[in-house]
Amino acid sequence: MPTSRQATPSRHRRGSEPPSHRGGAARRRKRGTLRIALAVALTVVVLGTAGLGWIYLKLNGDIDTFDAGGLSKTRPVAGASKGENVLVIGTDARTDGNSALGGGDSNDIGRSDTTFLLHIYADHRHAVAVSIPRDTLVTIPPCRLPDGTWTKAQPNTMFNAAYSVGETAKGNPACTQNTVESLTGLRVDHTVVVDFKGFAALTDAVGGVRVCVPQDVYQNDLNPNLSTRGALLFKKGVQTVSGQKALDYVRIRHGIGDGSDIGRIKRQQAFVAGLIKKVKSDGLTPANLLPLAEAATKSLTVDPGLGSANKLISFAMSLKDIDLHNTKFVTIPWRYVGERVAIVEPDASELWAGLRADRTIDGRNAAGTKGKAAASASPSPSADVSGAGIDVAVYNGTTTGGLASRAAATLTRHGFTVTGTANASSQDHATTLIEYGAGLKTRAETVARLFPGAQLEPLTGSGIDVVLGRTYATAAPSASPTPTALPSSVAADARSADADPCSDLSYG
């Protein structure tokens, strides 16, 4: 005879228990299932968070930063532009295994191969990248050497020499940033240095970039020292390149297009446009950005302001609303001087003024709500000054970078013809001087109306020179009307990130 313990299971067979007991068991089973689900979800969250934390920790460990102590003590004021400026330097340094990709001696001096200033407009819907040819003749301002001392200013020097100041294998990104700030009058918010390995890794991480090659390209196009043309590197036409092949494509200069550095810059602009297009098409999400960030941080050197994975990814995410068509690539206004490149004025000063005022290529105000408020400000007392027919040369008589460009932009907006900008022979001028030749006093007085407190001084020579002093450096930027558009010489040469790679095969 079965005991009560043996009889109990028979009452719990499916269909045999009373209705009231069935409801209680169902609730218990439901609670049990819910507990299991919550436990699994909690485990996933904990593991996922730990995994994400490990990824961020790993990324942070991979990021190199350069010493901000090498930045100039007389930088352009912060906030003069409502947008952001990011300096991107492509270096041919052969350290850390880069010689395997680019050849050369691993102990060679680091040089900047490609440089552009990316201006992100305040509305975060427009951006423009301005390429600066490496052979451009500029004034390299004082820069810090490895032993802590500072150099003297180097006028009429090739732009890429700034990165080599100090003659170290890794280069001097702070000196390049100082030079760009001095040249443009714009404050650089962030600087990113990409080496050969970083570039190759980035292109691998996105699965390659679509390019259009105008003709067959062989090994001796990459290395003209070869006695034969070598193997075929690129067949004419559309193709996707990544890694070493992408690096070869952007580095080739000879045997493709006109063989000039300007032609190569245009090809590099087309490549970067294709890279942005690929990243945007894949989706600018944290999931897609993490592999890209992992590849990038292994070979990037950044300023301390971008020195963490969180800052890098947050910065990248802040660009997600910039439309491809509104992302433009241009080159600083230039002309050849022998084998070197000279900056064309007043076009260059108008370009920097346009960026400072957050004006797009076609003259639209992209300054956002702050820009609208600024646009409605009352006009400057000097708004009625007309410099039509008056030629002026501008010299920076202080150690504050970018003043000559700022003053040139103001003069240009008022119709003056700026014949050139440079540093003065000395940088200790307290007040601004307006120097003028015989018979030009009246015109000099017109110039002086744009520089309150300036002193007029006759010259034994000819022409009108503006020598800027510290009074101008400490004065607020001129409130004269902002330019309606960037110079036509710049706009006509602009390339959009959404352009078809085969739309213009004249780019080198």
Image: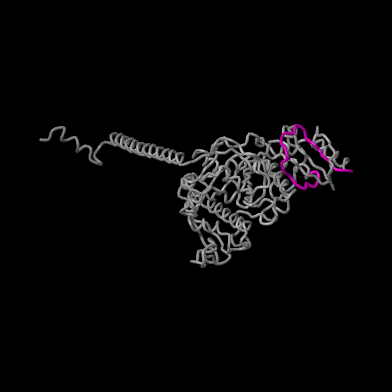
Horizontal and vertical percent position of residue 449: 83, 37
Q: Quick one: quadrant of the C terminus? A: bottom right
21 left or right, relative to 258: left
Give the farthest residue toward the front.
460
Count numbered badges in the picture.
0
- Is residue 435 highlighted in magenta? yes
Residue sitting nearer the eye, 425 or 70: 425
Q: What span is in magenta? A: 413-439
Q: Is residue 442 above or below residue 453?
A: below
Quadrant including the N terminus: top left
Display coloring = one colour
The single residue placed furthest to the left in the displayed view is: 1
- Picture quadrant where residue 36 is located: top left
* Residue 87 seen in this snapshot: yes
In this rendered view, identify the residue nearer to me: 357 or 227.
227
On screen, residue 248 above or below 463: below
Q: Position of residue 325 (x, y in %)?
A: 63, 52
Q: Residue at x 81, y 32 (%)?
A: 453
Is residue 22 located in the magenta-colored stretch of the structure? no
Q: Residue 369: in sight, yes or no? A: no
Percent x, y of residue 380: 79, 36
Q: State the residue in front, 431 or 265.
A: 431
In the rendered image, the vertical position of residue 216 relative to residue 438, given as above or below: below
